[in-house]
């Protein structure tokens, strides 16, 4: 009987059954022999009697028989060898075909990988991001500059504002993350910025759900429901923005679509603002900076489209705190998270940082990060504090929507050089200023602001210089830096040789660096860079080694 989970049935039988079968087989064979004997059929092969000794030409007959036997064996061996060769050729063909397919597949994979890396490099390049920002500004009718309420002046880009004014676009400020600054500070910044352009107060929601989940259950408005009572899920100012844009579209009497572009530096909340206004997860947003790489249009109403844009590229000429907060140097690998966190700590009030993070007194940023790592449990093997992980968490708090800090607005607020009184008046035309004022008052009334004592005072470094056009040489430098970052350490790099140029090979430690000769030039230098310890040991050894092996105590031991 076939047992479960077995491919074949068992052959084990009882002894009586086995003996019975054997007996029946014997009887059957005996009957067959008996019948064959009656019929006279013999199963035994006839014995070859050979050639009798008395037969004439006996030697010739034996010789011919031997030749036939050898010929038959030879033909048999040839057939055997032919079959063997055919099988070998078949295996070789299958192997070659398989290798060809594998090689083709491997080449295709390598080619796709190279193309994917090139596309990633192009999308991460400054030239591509600047071209996308210019494309967004050219295609839109209204430009909304999103500012972080914690440092509105540092989030402003004079180059962007000047370009918008030159192209006769409408400019409006949107002050996001107002729930992370004290109320009086938000009011002062509102009064300061209103002298130049209309300002909208906004608090974006960071817990917008996916559209597929929204379709499965009834849509929940951002100000109602159990899930929207949390501080991060609450959204304020979205209705005011929608009403203001609708009124502006009606007042301007446009025929086509009204395109509204949201621009600003990385992590000011452009994508989160669009998601909050739309009510669904239309744009990819997160704590990580620089997620948006290209422009994206989102349909808001029947005649209004919102355009998401990548973050403005910050110039390297900006101060260190501005680069730590506004640029993507950490994500690009040009600066470490430890350096960025140390820069921010040096420009903060020490007492407020201690109270905010509940850490004891510290002497320098490294000691603070050590205490912060131990408090958060960022430990390595052996209980050593992981300062890099602590720096990453600290930097994420400051660039994300978690840390509460504020900057004081300037006391003497004068118009920038590119902005005149006529331009300010032109920026106000078409907007429903009463609805904007009512929406801002509603946001100031409903938002839960932090206490001034729990907010860290931060010194702003002024407007951040942005790059809207990147030169070709800067693009080449950035590509070379990205290639070096992607390449592992110790790999050899060979720069392409142009006419009259030198070929430089970058090698690892302990190898020679040789500048090869270009056409019509001489070899200028040949430098050997070896391990310093080995060089020092060789120099010391050369002082005590002489050409002769003779030893003289009076000479050598003085």
Image (tube, rainbow, N blue to C red):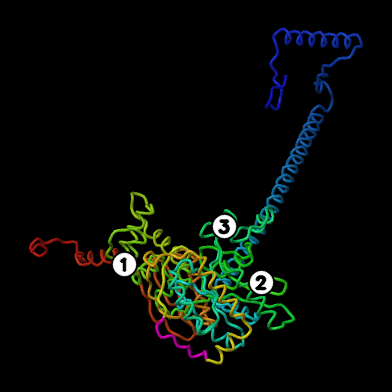
Label 2 and label 1: CA atoms lie apart by 43 Å
Label 1 and label 3: CA atoms lie apart by 35 Å
Q: Above or below — where is 91 with respect to 460?
A: above
Asked whether residue 419 is drawn in magenta, I would say yes
Disc marking residue 297: 2
What residue is drawn where x is 43% and y is 84%?
Answer: 522
Upstream in the sequence, badge 2 or badge 1?
A: 2
Q: Quadrant of residue 292?
A: bottom right
Disc 1 + disc 3, Cβ < 8 Å: no
Residue 499 seen in this snapshot = no
Observer-side mark, 3 or 2, equals 3
Asked whether residue 249 is drawn in magenta, I would say no
Disc marking residue 350: 1
In this image, 289 relative to 80: left or right?
Answer: left
Determine the residue located farthest toward the right in the rendered image: 39
Q: Which residues are the magenta region?
A: 410-420
Disc marking residue 228: 3
Q: Above or below — where is 98 with respect to 80?
A: below
Q: Residues within 10 Å of mark 3 (few under 14, many from 20)?
A: some
Upstream in the sequence, badge 3 or badge 2?
A: 3
Q: Callout 1: helix, strand or loop?
A: helix
Observer-side mark, 1 or 3, equals 3
| Image quarter in which the N terminus is found | top right
Q: Position of residue 3 (x, y in %)?
A: 69, 22
Q: 338 or 303: which is nearer to us?
A: 303
């Amino acid at each position: 009987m076939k047992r479960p989970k077995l491919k074949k049935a068992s052959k084990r039988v009882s002894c009586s059954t086995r003996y019975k079968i054997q007996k029946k087989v014997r009887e059957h064979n005996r009957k067959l022999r008996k019948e064959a004997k009656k019929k006279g059929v013999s199963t035994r092969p006839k014995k070859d009697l050979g050639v009798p000794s008395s037969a004439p030409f006996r030697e010739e007959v034996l010789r011919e028989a031997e030749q036939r036997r050898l010929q038959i064996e030879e033909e048999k061996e040839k057939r055997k060898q032919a079959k063997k060769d055919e099988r070998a050729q078949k295996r070789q063909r299958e192997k070659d075909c398989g290798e060809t397919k594998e090689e083709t597949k491997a080449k295709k994979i390598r080619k796709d990988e190279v193309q994917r890396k090139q596309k990633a490099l192009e999308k991460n390049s400054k030239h591509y991001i600047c071209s996308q920002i210019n494309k967004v500004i050219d295609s839109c009718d209204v430009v909304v500059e999103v500012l972080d309420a914690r440092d509105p002046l540092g989030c402003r880009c004079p180059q962007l504002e000047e370009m918008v004014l030159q192209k006769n676009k409408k400019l409006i400020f949107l002050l996001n993350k107002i729930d992370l600054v004290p109320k009086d500070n938000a009011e002062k910044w509102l009064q300061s910025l209103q002298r130049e352009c209309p300002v909208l107060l906004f608090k974006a929601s960071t817990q917008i759900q996916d559209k597929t989940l929204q379709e499965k259950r009834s849509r929940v408005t951002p100000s109602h429901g159990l899930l929207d009572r949390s501080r991060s899920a609450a959204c304020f100012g979205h209705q005011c923005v929608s009403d203001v844009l609708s009124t502006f579209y009606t007042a301007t009497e446009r025929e086509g679509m009204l395109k509204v572009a949201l621009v600003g530096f990385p992590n000011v909340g452009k994508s989160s603002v669009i998601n909050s206004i739309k009510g669904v997860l239309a744009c990819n947003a997160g704590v990580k900076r620089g997620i948006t790489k290209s422009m994206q249009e989102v349909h808001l109403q029947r005649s209004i489209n919102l355009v998401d844009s990548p973050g403005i590229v910050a110039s390297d000429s900006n101060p260190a705190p501005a680069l730590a907060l506004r640029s993507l140097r950490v994500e690009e690998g040009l600066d470490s998270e430890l350096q960025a966190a140390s820069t921010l700590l040096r420009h903060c009030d020490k007492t407020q940082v201690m109270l905010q993070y509940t850490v004891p007194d510290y002497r320098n940023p490294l000691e603070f990060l050590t205490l912060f790592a131990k408090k958060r449990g960022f430990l390595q093997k052996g209980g050593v504090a992981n300062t890099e992980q602590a720096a990453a968490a600290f930097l994420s708090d400051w660039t994300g929507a978690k840390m509460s800090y504020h900057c004081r607005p300037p006391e003497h607020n004068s118009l920038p050089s590119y902005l005149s009184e006529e331009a300010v008046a032109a920026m106000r035309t078409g907007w429903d200023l009463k609805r904007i004022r009512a929406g801002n008052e509603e946001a100031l009334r409903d938002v839960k602001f932090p206490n001034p004592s729990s907010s860290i005072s931060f010194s702003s470094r002024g407007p951040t210089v942005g790059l809207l056009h990147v030169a070709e040489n800067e693009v080449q430098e950035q590509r070379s830096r990205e290639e070096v970052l992607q390449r592992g350490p110790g790999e050899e790099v060979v720069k392409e040789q142009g006419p009259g140029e030198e070929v430089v090979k970058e090698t690892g430690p302990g190898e020679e660096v040789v500048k090869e000769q270009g056409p019509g030039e001489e070899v200028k230098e040949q430098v050997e860079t070896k391990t310093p310890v080995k060089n020092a040991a060789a120099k010391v050894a050369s002082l005590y080694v002489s050409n002769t092996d003779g030893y003289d105590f009076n000479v050598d031991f003085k």
